[in-house]
Amino acid sequence: MTAKVENGAEQGFTLLEMLVAMAVLSLGALALLNLAGENTRTAGAMEQRLFASIVAENHAIEALTAPLPPALGHTQGADRAGPETWRWTRRVSPAGEGMLRIDVRVAGRTGGTIGEATVFRGPP
């Protein structure tokens, strides 16, 4: 804001006005930095889910396309995809009428399920 002094000269912003403007500007900058950090964290989580899902789908497709049906029960293993090694568990159970239900779950470093796939295989 500008104000006129009696002799016609203009006066600049006051110190208080400058401090308020800087505070508003810094709050906006902090919000943008927080948003950028959140985007980075979300991208990392999406990358993990993508690789885990790829591993799960690969094992499900292998079980579907193998010449012989997989044995009933649990099978475990580890595969490398991207920058990590993923632990997978495949559970094969009867689904009725000669069909098999094949569940594949993939865990990351934390041990929780990140990706999974379920397929059904018909009788041979």
Image: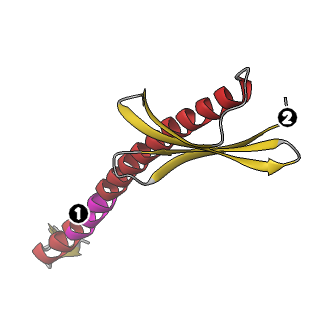
Q: Give the image's coloring scheme.
A: secondary structure
Q: Is residue 8 visible?
A: no
* Circle nearer the N terminus (1, 2): 1
- Disc marking residue 26: 1
Q: Is residue 28 visible?
A: yes
Quarter of the view holding residue 5: bottom left
Calculate the distance from the C-alpha at mark 1 to the C-alpha at mark 2.
66 Å
The tally of labels here is 2
Q: Nearer the viewer, residue 98 or 81?
A: 98
Tell me the element at label 1: helix
Residue 4 versus residue 65 in the image, above or below: below
The disc labelled 2 sits on which kind of residue?
Pro
The disc labelled 1 sits on which kind of residue?
Ser
- Disc marking residue 123: 2
Quarter of the view holding residue 66: top right
Quarter of the view holding residue 118: top right
User: How crowded is the residue under tag 2: few (<14 C-alpha within 10 Å), some, or many (20+)?
Assistant: few
- Residue at 73% of width from left, 20% of height from top? 67
Residue 2 versus residue 43 in the image, above or below: below
User: Is 25 in the magenta?
Assistant: yes
Which mark is in front, 1 or 2?
2
For residue 100, side relative to residue 54 (left or right): right
Q: Which residues are magenta?
A: 23-31
Residue 113, position in %: x, y?
48, 52
Residue 122, position in %: x, y?
84, 36
